[in-house]
Amino acid sequence: EAGVTQFPSHSVIEKGQTVTLRCDPISGHDNLYWYRRVMGKEIKFLLHFVKESKQDESGMPNNRFLAERTGGTYSTLKVQPAELEDSGVYFCASSQVELALYNEQFFGPGTRLTVL
Amino acid sequence: AQTVTQSQPEMSVQEAETVTLSCTYDTSESDYYLFWYKQPPSRQMILVIRQEAYKQQNATENRFSVNFQKAAKSFSLKISDSQLGDAAMYFCAYRSADRDDKIIFGKGTRLHILP
């Protein structure tokens, strides 16, 4: 079974440009999460989808970030326009929606974004 | 709000020795999960071990074990018989008991294994 995949693995862009990150969750996982790690700091939650609906977007830093999950499968995270402080590693994770007490989140390898 | 603190940015251990990574957290909740994740260089982050707060017994997974002190809000990871493949960034993390809630991470500890 394929794990969570993310594309691209690295992206280098100029300040002011637009970048779109993609995450493909594990097949059948309705929960999809985005996290971000800025250099030297904690990995921080950005938002959580359940299928195509945004369950929690309390971690989105500002309106330059737009996340979508059309059709409830893969998700995209667009940064427009990118700023220097957006540099970091963006992680995606997915989990099943079950009645179990605990649903493990499986993480992708991350996309390293560098804004120059 | 919940927080997770890892006070050791880097640690080194001799191969085959034992090392303990420290973690403290803060929460007002009584039911939650604690985790240690491992991220090897250029690879995916994987779950090493999980502890349910309502369980008094410390979790163990092969060479990995935790020391969970709920009153002290401490959650350390012990790696026994360290191997070269254990070299990685280790993140301590917290999640509330809500099964689909977000995970809160510490800053991480980079572990070096010396041959």
Image (cartoon, grey):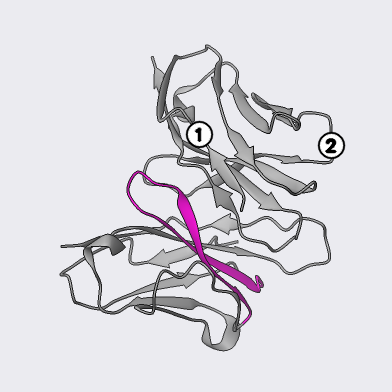
Residue A69, given in percent of the width and then of the height, sits at 52, 82
Identify residue for label 2.
Answer: B55
Q: Residue at x 72, y 58 (%)?
A: A103
Instruction: Farthest residue to the bottom: give it.
Output: A71
Whether residue A78 is visible: yes
Is A44 a magenta residue? Answer: yes
Quadrant containing the C terminus of chain B in the rendered view: top left
Does B79 sit above or below residue A114? Answer: above
Which one is nearer the viewer's eye here, B71 or A9? B71
Q: Secondary structure at mark 1?
A: loop
Q: Is residue A3 left or right of residue B54?
A: left
The amino acid pointed to by label 1 is Gln
Q: Is residue A94 above or below residue B37?
A: below
**Is A55 within the magenta?**
no
Which numbered disc covers residue B6?
1
Q: Quadrant of residue A111?
A: bottom left
**Disc 2 with disc 1 on a shared chain:** yes
Residue at 57%, 32% in the rendered image: B23
Say which label, 2 or 1, has the lower sequence index.
Answer: 1
Left or right placement of residue B94 versus residue A6 in this view? right
Task: Report x, y in % for residue B4.
Answer: 56, 42
Magenta span covers which residues? A28-51
Q: Main secondary structure of the magenta part?
A: strand
Q: Residue at x 24, y 68 (%)?
A: A83
| Chain of the residue on which disc 2 is drawn | B
